[in-house]
Each structure stands twice: as structure tokens, then as C-alpha cells.
């Protein structure tokens, strides 16, 4: 798929810089927004329509927020190959709507490490659902656009604004590479922290 129409997005961010501007831009283009916890609260307080992840999954956030996006209604929507009729049919049969844009940035583990938290407290700052969504979206860049940090929002808005809310393949590939770089750095930081505590 060369040109991907952006019709549905999931947003789950720790760094909320530029979030409202991006969300408003998406809503102005008719994009349906789905979001988690604090991200949803910020978007809703800006007066923008947004659905909760729990509305999509039919399951509440559990274990103190450890499990919220780890669900087939989220990940099948991210990982569907939109060029494969069988994938599309499977989603239709299961009542799962695909996602086109994944906007995720991760828990600030560096800040947890700087604060000198003990190991048990520090591991609570290790993001699981975020990297999982990011990696799924980056793997599936042929069918999904991923935004791994606020610094890319303007570039994405410019391309979508110039192309009737469609994302080209080159932008999607570029954002996928940036995403794998971000998750690699995140894992390396955690690895270094854990090794230093042995």
C-alpha cells in the first residue's frame, strides 16, 4: 500500500507535548481517536472526542495499569496487513476495527533511574504495552503509520495535511526506523540499569 488513509488512531503518551495540537488536527480530518488513561483525559479536557481503550477491548485496565492495551482488539488492529484480503476478512468476522496511526511514547525510565528508586520501585517504570504497540506498528509500516515521539508530530501533520490525510510509504518507513531506534535505546537503558544493580 503506497498511500495510507488515516482514519483511526490510538494515542498513549507519557510526554504530552504537542498532544492536543495533534489530536485536534486529527479530529479536524475526521480521524477517530482511541486513547488510554492520562492521555485520554488531556484530549477530552481539550473538548475533543476520544474513546477509551477499555471501550474498544471491552475489558478494564487491570493490575494498576500494567495491562490495558495488551489485547487482540488493539494488536490485531495494529498488525493487520491491509493488502491481505484474508486479514481484512478476519477482522471483519471478529468485529475488530483496524488502526492507521499509532502515537506512543514511553514511560520515562531515565527519570526513575535518576531518582535513585530501589529496584522494585524502578521496574514499575518499565513500559510494556508501549514498546509492544510501537514494535508492532513499526513492523507493520506497510499498513500503519507510527509516531514514537513528539518531535515527529509536525512532520506527520504536514504530510497528512498536504495529502488529504494520507501517509506515504516513505514516511511510514522512516517513522518505523525511528521507532526501532527509540525502543532499542529504551531497552539498552533498562539493561544498563539492571546490570548495574547486580
Image (tube, helix red, strand yellow):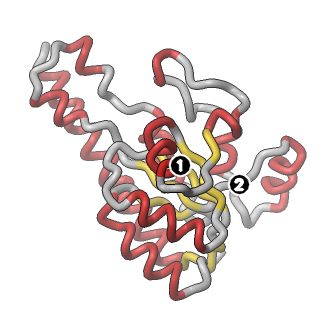
Residue 144 in the image: x percent, y percent?
Answer: 58, 62
Of badges 1 and 2, the one in the foreground is: 1
Residue 133 in the image: x percent, y percent?
Answer: 51, 44
Using residue 175 as the reference point, say whether residue 133 is left or right of it: right
The residue shown at (38%, 76%) is 155
Q: Earlier in the sequence, mark 1 or mark 2?
A: 1
Q: In what element is the residue under mark 1?
A: helix
Using residue 3 as the reference point, say whether residue 198 is left or right of it: left
In terms of depth relative to the viewer, which is nearer, 10 or 174? 10
Using residue 132 as the reference point, say whether residue 116 is left or right of it: left
Q: Farthest residue to the right: give it.
A: 93
Residue 177 in the image: x percent, y percent?
Answer: 38, 62
The residue shown at (31%, 51%) is 182
Please rate how many residues cluster around mark 2, counting C-alpha atoms within 10 Å: few if below 14, some from 14 to 19, many from 20. Answer: many
Alpha-carbon distance for marks 1 and 2?
22 Å
Q: Looking at the picture, does residue 38 appear above or below residue 49?
A: above
Q: Looking at the picture, does residue 157 appear above or below residue 31?
A: below
The residue wearing badge 2 is: 98
The residue wearing badge 1 is: 44
Contact (CB < 8 A) between labels 1 and 2? no
Residue 132 in the image: x percent, y percent?
Answer: 48, 39
Amino acid at each position: 500500500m503506497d498511500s495510507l488513509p488515516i482514519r483511526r488512531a490510538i494515542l498513549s503518551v507519557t510526554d504530552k507535548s504537542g498532544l492536543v495540537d495533534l489530536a485536534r488536527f486529527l479530529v479536524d480530518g475526521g480521524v477517530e481517536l482511541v486513547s488510554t488513561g492520562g492521555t485520554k483525559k488531556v484530549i477530552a479536557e481539550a473538548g475533543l472526542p476520544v474513546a477509551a481503550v477499555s471501550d474498544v477491548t471491552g475489558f478494564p485496565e487491570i493490575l494498576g495499569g500494567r495491562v490495558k492495551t495488551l489485547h487482540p482488539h488493539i494488536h490485531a488492529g495494529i498488525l493487520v496487513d491491509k493488502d491481505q484480503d484474508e486479514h481484512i476478512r478476519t477482522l471483519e468476522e471478529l468485529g475488530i476495527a483496524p488502526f492507521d496511526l499509532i502515537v506512543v511514547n514511553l514511560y520515562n525510565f531515565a527519570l526513575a533511574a535518576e531518582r535513585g528508586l530501589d529496584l522494585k520501585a524502578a521496574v514499575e517504570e518499565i513500559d510494556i504495552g508501549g514498546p509492544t504497540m510501537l514494535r508492532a506498528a513499526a513492523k507493520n509500516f506497510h499498513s500503519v503509520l507510527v509516531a514514537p515521539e513528539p518531535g515527529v508530530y509536525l512532520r506527520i501533520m504536514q504530510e497528512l495535511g498536504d495529502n488529504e490525510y494520507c501517509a506515504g510509504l516513505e514516511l511510514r518507513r522512516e517513522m518505523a526506523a525511528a521507532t526501532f531506534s527509540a525502543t532499542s535505546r529504551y531497552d539498552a537503558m533498562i539493561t544498563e540499569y539492571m546490570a548495574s544493580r547486580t
